[in-house]
Amino acid sequence: MTIETAILGGGCFWCLEAVYLEVKGVTHVESGYTGGHQPNPTYEQVCVGDTGHAEVVKLDFDPAVVSYRDLLEIFFTIHDPTTLNRQGNDVGTQYRSVIYHQSPQQEATARQVIAEMAGVWDAPIVTELSPTQPYYKAEDYHQDYFRQHPLQGYCAFVVAPKVAKFKKTYTHRLK
């Protein structure tokens, strides 16, 4: 089995993590931070918005089961790629829509999917496409957050609907 990695940011990492944990072929999901200038940032530092980091998920996946393209199509379904530095009530550069590509092939695929998605959305896509940058794992209490806290307010009203939408739209991709 060959494992590849994808790093994606599209708002709060709890939302992305909860969805990608359900995707067949995704072998590991981890919440973290990347794209900033401060080494080893904390959640509190990232939330202030001064470190330049985005909240992201790092996905390990088996491309024989789920392609990078499939992961990106899911990504563009579960967040709004047309709002700059914002997802719903989450506002700031840490919530930007961004794809950190790991290879020239991932970059080319991402460019193609972004171009295709431009025809789906009514507003321009603002998703950044950047090469991989230093990645930092988020604190342990952020890992698998939705499964541990499904009744917490943000999880119940923001994360749960995204997971439900994914499950309804991508039944063929469920574990």
Image (cartoon, rainbow, N blue to C red):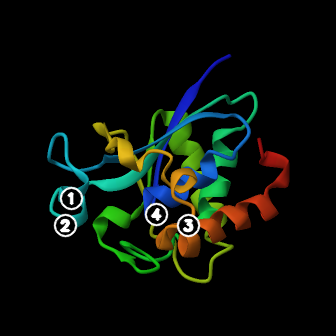
**Which residue is found at the position 17% from the left and 56% from the top?**
51
Determine the image quadrant of residue 86: bottom left
Identity, as a three-letter code, of the amino acid under mark 1 = Glu
Q: Is residue 130 left or right of residue 81?
A: left
Spot occupied by residue 52 in the image (x, y as percentages of width and height): 22, 57
Q: Residue furthest right?
A: 172
Label 1, secondary structure: give it.
helix
Q: For marks 2 and 4, give the CA distance.
A: 21 Å
Q: Are marks 1 and 2 in contact (CB under 8 Å)?
A: yes
Mark 1, mark 3: which one is toward the viewer?
3
Q: For marks 4 and 1, give the CA distance.
A: 24 Å
Label 4, secondary structure: give it.
loop
Quarter occupied by the N terminus: top right
Identity, as a three-letter code, of the amino acid under mark 2 = Val
Instruction: Tell which circle, 4 or 3, labels the residue nearer the N-terminal end.
Output: 4
Determine the image quadrant of residue 97: bottom left
Q: Label for residue 127? A: 4
Spot occupied by residue 31 in the image (x, y as percentages of width and height): 42, 46
Determine the image quadrant of residue 65: top right
Q: Label for residue 151? A: 3
